[in-house]
Amino acid sequence: MSAIPRKLYEQELARLQVELAHMQEWVRASGDRIVVIFEGRDASGKGGAIKRITEPLNPRVCRVVALAAPTEREKTQWYFQRYVPHLPAAGEVILFDRSWYNRAGVEKVMGFCTPAEHREFLRSCPEFERMIVRSGVRLIKYWFSVSDEEQERRFKARIDDPTKRWKLSPMDLGGRTHWVDYSRAKDEMFVHTDIPEAPWHVVEADDKRKARLNCISHLLSMIPYHQVHLDTPKLPPRQPDQGYVRPERETATYVSDHAAALIT
């Protein structure tokens, strides 16, 4: 399959982002509650898709939740407890950049939970999600699928790029040596948690541009939004000076004009 040209990608992304803005206003007006879960292998493109979704949106309406490793106290809590406070109130969209499914993936594969805890997760997770859905929350789950070869290429690119090297954690690198283990864990997770109330939607992610467009388009199709009429704001006139005199420029310390130095 050929890659989508950059210009066409940018045009369609801009169109979809306008639709995301319309969706946001509908969520605010209707009081809807939306949770979107992003899962997948490391370097599968989840973060890039999330970034393109949030770019045109109000962060007070659409929030990204990316929890760090649990504290010692949190490890003793009910497993889902630390995720519950992040669920949306009316008029909010919550994007989970990884979620409670950590237990079905990295925790199982890397031995961070016991076999009994993993079995209990697979049993209780569908019930937890059914409770969320019954409460009126729209729960949408995405799995970003990336091939072995493409993941390797992206990892090498991150190693070579100082601005992206932070994305590579020891856990990410360790995942390469557990590729098959992660595959088996994902397959088992799907068997237990691909439920009618909250099915998994697989995004083929070897082509990042296509993956972003496909994910955003599908997300919009899952929400029954319509364009909400909003009055166009009018810019009021500037307040008169009323005798105000701005202090001399020399009284303040300005940031040097780095940009000007580049073009001279």
Image (cartoon, rainbow, N blue to C red):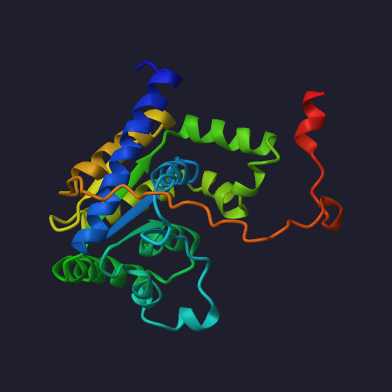
Apparent side of residue 195 relative to residue 115 in the rendered image (left or right): left
Q: Residue at x 45, y 83 (%)?
A: 76
Q: Which picture quadrant has residue 117?
A: bottom left
Can the viewer see residue 102? yes
Apparent side of residue 98 relative to residue 223 in the rendered image (left or right): right
> x%, y% of residue 217?
27, 37
> x%, y% of residue 203?
32, 38
Quadrant position of the C terminus in the picture: top right
Q: Is residue 111 above or below residue 142?
A: below
Tell me how many marks there are: 0
Q: Residue at x 39, y 64 (%)?
A: 103
Q: Residue furthest right?
A: 250
Q: Is residue 198 above or below residue 218?
A: below
Q: Is residue 198 above or below residue 10?
A: below
Q: Nearer the viewer, residue 104 or 109?
A: 104
Apparent side of residue 210 relative to residue 44 in the rendered image (left or right): left
Q: Nearer the viewer, residue 255 or 168?
A: 255
> x%, y% of residue 211?
36, 34
Q: Which picture quadrant has residue 58?
A: bottom left
Quadrant position of the N terminus in the picture: top left
Q: Residue at x 71, y 40 (%)?
A: 162
Q: Is residue 164 above or below residue 251?
A: above
Q: Residue furthest front?
A: 243
Can the viewer see residue 203? no
Q: Residue at x 79, y 37 (%)?
A: 258
